[in-house]
Amino acid sequence: MSESNLGEIERWHKKIEMIGIDIKGLNQETETGRLKLKTTFMNEHFIHELDKIGLQLINIRGTIFGRLVLLLEVKK
């Protein structure tokens, strides 16, 4: 992963944290450039807040460990 990608992920990490989402992991897919956010709780309020900061929810799924994995895309 390039240094600019790490800086971008760090910037998104801070923005997501500021809206109150408990981040368990955040990384970027190499093929699509979409962000994968791992968290334990998500509701409609947080989805709207993600939209306000420029991230669009593409997919959400649960894991066997009780976490949620959100696939997010930066809005153009």
Image (tube, rainbow, N blue to C red):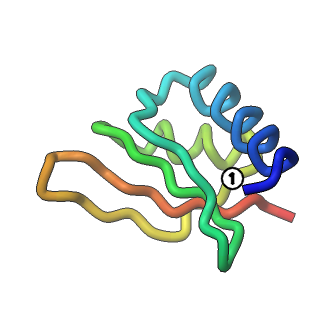
Q: Is 24 on the left or on the right of 56, as rendered?
A: left
Q: Nearer the viewer, residue 2 or 66?
A: 2
Location of mark 1 (residue): 55
Residue type, numbered disc 1: Leu
Q: Is 49 on the left or on the right of 43, as rendered?
A: right
**In this picture, is 27 found above or below 21?**
below
For the point 59% across and 60% down, the residue is 72
Q: Is 57 on the left or on the right of 8, as rendered?
A: left
What x and y, as percent, mark residue 54? 76, 49
Q: Nearer the viewer, residue 42 or 27?
A: 27
Q: Residue reaching furthest left? A: 64
Q: Could you say which quadrant of the image residue 6 lies in?
A: top right
**In this picture, is 44 found above or below 73?**
above
Q: Could you say which quadrant of the image residue 25 lies in?
A: top left
Q: Could you say which quadrant of the image residue 64 lies in?
A: bottom left
What x and y, as percent, mark residue 5? 79, 51
Question: Looking at the rendering, in which quadrant would you find the C terminus?
Answer: bottom right
What x and y, as percent, mark residue 43? 37, 42
Q: Residue reaching furthest bottom? A: 31
What is the number of callouts on the image? 1
For the point 60% across and 67% down, the residue is 29
For the point 75% across and 59% down, the residue is 74
Secondary structure, mark 1, is: strand
Question: Looking at the rendering, in which quadrant would you find the N terminus?
Answer: bottom right
For the point 47% across and 29% down, the residue is 21
Disc 1 residue crowd, few under 14, some 14–19, many 20+, Cα 10 Å:
many
